[in-house]
Amino acid sequence: MGFECRQCGICCLSLGPYLTVISDSHDGTYQLYHEVTGETDLVRIDPDKLHLLSDTTLQEEEPEACTFLRRDPASGRVRCIVHATRPLLCQQYACYEILITYPDREWAGRVKGGRALLTADPGLRNLWDEMIQPLAISNDTKWRDTVRTILSARGYQVIW
């Protein structure tokens, strides 16, 4: 089973401070500056997402979200409105298969391909090393279900 984007937006919720609009041509084209790489990119609003441009509710709720991230009211999905012309850095982003949060939805950890956990939470790391890493389940669906059961029983939430 390959990765399928769920359009949750988690990948871009912290990009706002790093991508700055430096010019707006007022025709749906923007020049961006990337604070980390020092590069600039020209992006354009995707024609099929133009109707989402004026709704900045997501940025009000998530102040660090990318300025081009929008929640589609019709589907509830979170969409990049410049997806077709997004910066190379965004194109190269590798999403995580599983997001692990605390009950308040605050980030606790992420699982990348190969079942590798990224976390700064020592309790989650210990739980992972002792109970999840040793699992000998080759079927991905069964493995994810088992991981969800183990983590949920200890107060974490699992999103995929």
Image (cartoon, rainbow, N blue to C red):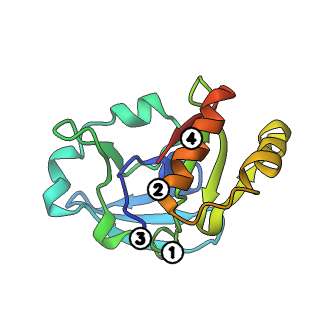
Instruction: Name the residue type under label 3.
Output: Gly
Q: Report the amino acid beneath label 2.
A: Thr
Helix or strand or loop: what does disc 2 sit on? helix
The three-letter code of the residue at mark 4 reads Arg
Q: Nearer the viewer, mark 3 or mark 4?
A: 4
Residue pointed to by mark 4: 148
- The tag earlier along the polypeptide, 3 or 4, is 3
Residue 29 lies in what quarter of the image?
Answer: bottom left
Q: CA distance from mark 1 to mark 2?
A: 26 Å
Q: Which residue is mark 2?
A: 141
Viewer-proximal residue among 17 and 61: 61
Which badge, 1 or 2, comes first in the chain's sequence?
1
Measure the C-alpha gap from mark 2 to mark 3.
12 Å
Disc number lying in front (4 or 1): 4
Marks 4 and 1, how far apart at CA? 28 Å
Which mark is first along the chain, 1 or 4?
Answer: 1
User: In the image, is 134 to the left or to the right of 73?
Assistant: right
Whether the residues at callouts 4 and 2 have beta carbons within 8 Å, the answer is: no
What residue does disc 3 label? Answer: 2
**Residue 111 percent across, percent down from the top left:** 62, 56
Q: Residues within 10 Å of mark 4 (few under 14, many from 20)?
A: some
Residue 15 visible in the current orientation: no
Element under disc 1: loop
Q: Nearer the viewer, mark 2 or mark 3?
A: 2
